[in-house]
Image (cartoon, rainbow, N blue to C red):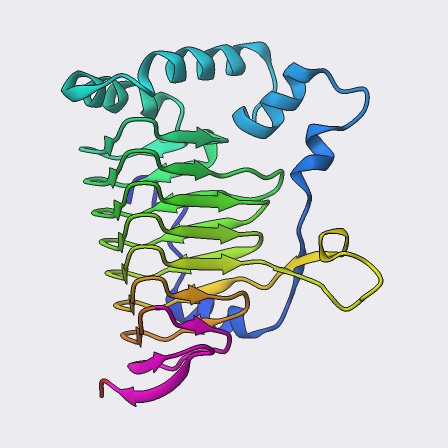
Amino acid sequence: MAGSDELPIADRSTELRASRSGERRPIARAQDQLFAPGTPSRAKYAALVVGRPGLWALVKYELIVTFAQSFPGALGLAIRKALFPLLLGSCGRNVVFGQHVVLRHPHKIHIGSNVVVDDNCLLDAKGETNRGIRIGDGVFVGRNTIFSCKDGDIEVADHANIGFNCEVFSASRVTIGKRVLMAAYSYVIGGDHDFSDPSKPVLEQSRTSSGVAIGDGVWLGAGAKILDGVSVGDAAVIGAGAVVRVSIPESAIAVGIPARVVGSRG
């Protein structure tokens, strides 16, 4: 992975243990930044989208996105291949960016070599203290997929395949292991809402995150949902449409709503 000497993908066993620790982080609200009184509109936009202060950072982002983001055909692919790395924290060789790919806080996005980010994807590394998004070598990110950080980190290890219309959200830490197959419409949700006070709407109560860890070689079937605080062990299989609320051991086969272990690949 590009820049791996400085920013290595974390050891998978460490991440699985961390996910079980139960530590929860509060999730900030983007609206609080967007509507902060006394802040100029340009500064709000820069904070939410560019992620760096200063006029030059804003102008550089706007020029590259305006010229490259929507350019069609093979020429558009070539232009994005040349220009998008100028915004990123690091970028390897042979990276393909599809049309209408959106980058937010791009200096905290690190991409390895031989990666495909298909059309209409969102890579949002937003946050004030996070490290952002790290994508390893040989990763495929399918069309319309969203990687969304709210002061959290997302790490996708080498040769993972993220299908079309998937979402990975992190308000603390979400890790996806090597050669994970994540089928279309799957969600990995590294955050949750408190609903303990029935006198308040859920939207007005606190939001927290424990994180999610998905081990190497896992297969998530189409439409699977992995909820906050869950770890999925290496080589496990999660059935299509399953809702995973508790951690799944290595090599297990889990199906249903809520998901339960029905067998083992071992």
Residue 9 seen: yes
Vertical arrangement, residue 150 with respect to residue 40, above or below:
below
The answer to whether 55 appears left or right of 195 in the picture is left
Residue 76 percent across, percent down from the top left = 22, 18
Residue 155 percent across, percent down from the top left? 40, 52
Specify whether residue 6 is in view. Answer: no
Q: Nearer the viewer, residue 163 or 172?
A: 163
Residue 259 inside the magenta-drawn segment: yes
What residue do we see at 39% from left, 72% from top?
242
- Inspect the magenta stretch and tell me whether residue 236 lies in it: no
Q: Residue at x 39, y 79 (%)?
A: 256
Choose top left, top right, bottom left or bottom right for residue 78. Answer: top left
Judged from this view, the residue extending furthest toward the right is 199
In the depicted structure, whether residue 52 falls above or below residue 232: above
- Identify the image quadrant of the C terminus: bottom left
28 or 183: which is nearer to us? 183
Q: Is 191 or 144 nearer to us in this picture? A: 144
185 versus 104 height, above or below: below
Quick check: 251 left or right of 89?
A: left
Q: Residue at x 43, y 45 (%)?
A: 147
- Please provide the residue range marked out in magenta: 241-264
Q: Position of residue 223 (x, y in %)?
A: 36, 62
Residue 145 appears left or right of 159? right
Give the residue drawn at x 36%, y 44%.
145
